[in-house]
Image (cartoon, grey):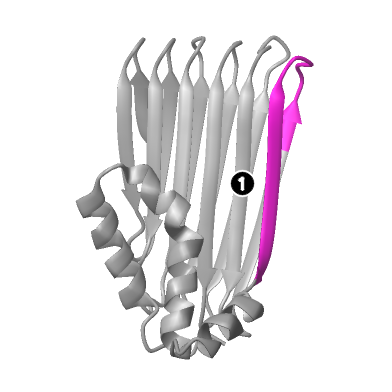
C-alpha cells in the first residue's frame, strides 16, 4: 500500500489510472489546511482483466479538503472494483466524491464508498455521488454508498443511481439528423462532462474527451 502524509497547508493532485490486473491501494493522512484532489481513470479497451482500487483517506487536521473524481468506461469482460473511504476525524473538514461509470459488453463494475464522520468532527461538509449507465444487457454495476455519521452539526449527503442511456434524448437527437452512434457518443460526453471539467486544463480535457469518444466508437451500446 502506498502511504502519504499531506502536511499542513500542502496541496496535492493524485492521478490513478487502472491498468491490467492491478491492485492499487493508497493510504493518505491530511493535516490541517491541506487539499487533496484525486482523479481516477478506468479507460482500458476490451480488457479481460481485473482491477481493484482502494483509497483510504483520513482528515486528521482541521479545515482539510478532499476531492475525489472518478471516470470509468468498462468493456469486454473487464472487472473493476473501486473502494473509497474518507474519514473525517476532526471538525471543519470538507470532502466531495463524484464517480461515474459507463459499462458495456460483459464487464462488471463495483463501487463501495465509505464516508465516516467522527463524533467530534462537527461542521463537516461531505458529499458522495455515484452515477452509472449500462450500455449492454450483460453489463452489471454494483454500487454501495455508506455513511457513518456520529456528529450532529454536519452537512452530509450521498446518492447513487444505475440506469440506461436516455432513450428520449437519443430519439430527440436522431429526429434532428444525428446518427445513432454519434448521438450516443454525445450523450456519454455530456454524462462525463462534470468530471472532465474538474481537470482545469483545456488541452487535457480535450484529450480525455477524445479518449472517451474512441472507447465508445462503433460499439453495440445496447
User: Does 198 sit above or below residue 147?
Assistant: below
Left or right of residue 141: residue 107: left
Location of mark 1 (residue): 129
Question: Which range is magenta?
Answer: 147-163
Image quarter (top left, top right, bottom left or bottom right) of the C terminus: bottom right
Image quarter (top left, top right, bottom left or bottom right) of the N terminus: top left
Looking at the image, which is closer to me, 36 or 196? 196
x, y (%) of residue 167?
64, 81
Residue 51 appears anywhere in the view: no
User: Does 180 sit above or below residue 10?
Assistant: below
Res. 96 image quadrant: top right
User: Does 123 sit above or below residue 99?
Assistant: above
Left or right of residue 7: residue 118: right
**Crowd around label 1: few <14 · some 14–19 · many ≥20 (10 Å):** some
Res. 189 image quadrant: bottom left
Q: Residue at x 31, y 34 (%)?
A: 13
Q: Residue at x 71, y 19 (%)?
A: 154
Residue at disc 1, secondary structure: strand
Left or right of residue 178: residue 199: left
Query: Magenta region, mostly helix, strand or loop?
Result: strand
x, y (%) of residue 98?
53, 46
Left or right of residue 129: residue 211: left
Residue placed furthest toward the front: 176
Q: Residue at x 43, y 13 (%)?
A: 31
Amino acid at each position: 500500500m502506498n502511504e502519504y502524509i499531506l502536511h499542513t497547508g500542502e496541496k496535492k493532485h493524485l492521478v490513478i489510472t487502472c491498468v491490467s490486473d492491478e491492485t492499487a491501494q493508497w493510504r493518505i493522512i491530511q493535516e490541517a489546511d491541506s487539499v487533496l484532489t484525486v482523479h481516477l481513470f478506468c479507460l482500458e479497451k476490451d480488457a479481460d482483466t481485473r482491477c481493484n482500487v482502494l483509497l483510504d483517506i483520513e482528515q486528521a487536521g482541521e479545515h482539510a479538503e478532499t476531492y475525489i473524481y472518478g471516470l470509468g468506461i468498462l468493456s469486454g469482460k473487464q472487472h473493476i472494483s473501486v473502494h473509497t473511504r474518507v474519514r473525517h476525524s476532526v471538525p471543519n473538514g470538507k470532502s466531495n466524491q463524484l464517480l461515474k461509470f459507463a459499462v458495456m459488453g460483459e464487464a462488471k463494475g463495483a463501487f463501495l464508498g465509505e464516508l465516516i464522520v467522527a463524533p467530534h468532527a462537527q461542521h463537516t461538509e461531505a458529499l458522495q455521488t455515484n452515477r452509472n449507465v449500462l450500455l449492454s444487457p450483460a453489463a452489471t454495476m454494483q454500487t454501495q454508498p455508506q455513511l457513518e455519521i456520529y456528529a450532529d452539526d454536519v452537512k452530509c449527503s450521498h446518492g447513487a443511481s444505475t440506469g440506461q442511456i436516455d432513450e428520449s434524448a437519443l430519439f430527440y437527437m436522431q429526429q434532428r439528423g444525428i446518427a445513432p452512434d454519434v448521438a450516443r457518443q454525445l450523450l456519454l460526453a455530456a454524462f462525463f462532462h462534470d468530471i472532465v471539467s474538474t481537470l482545469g486544463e483545456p488541452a487535457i480535457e480535450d484529450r480525455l474527451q477524445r479518449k472517451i469518444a474512441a472507447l465508445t466508437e462503433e460499439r453495440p451500446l445496447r
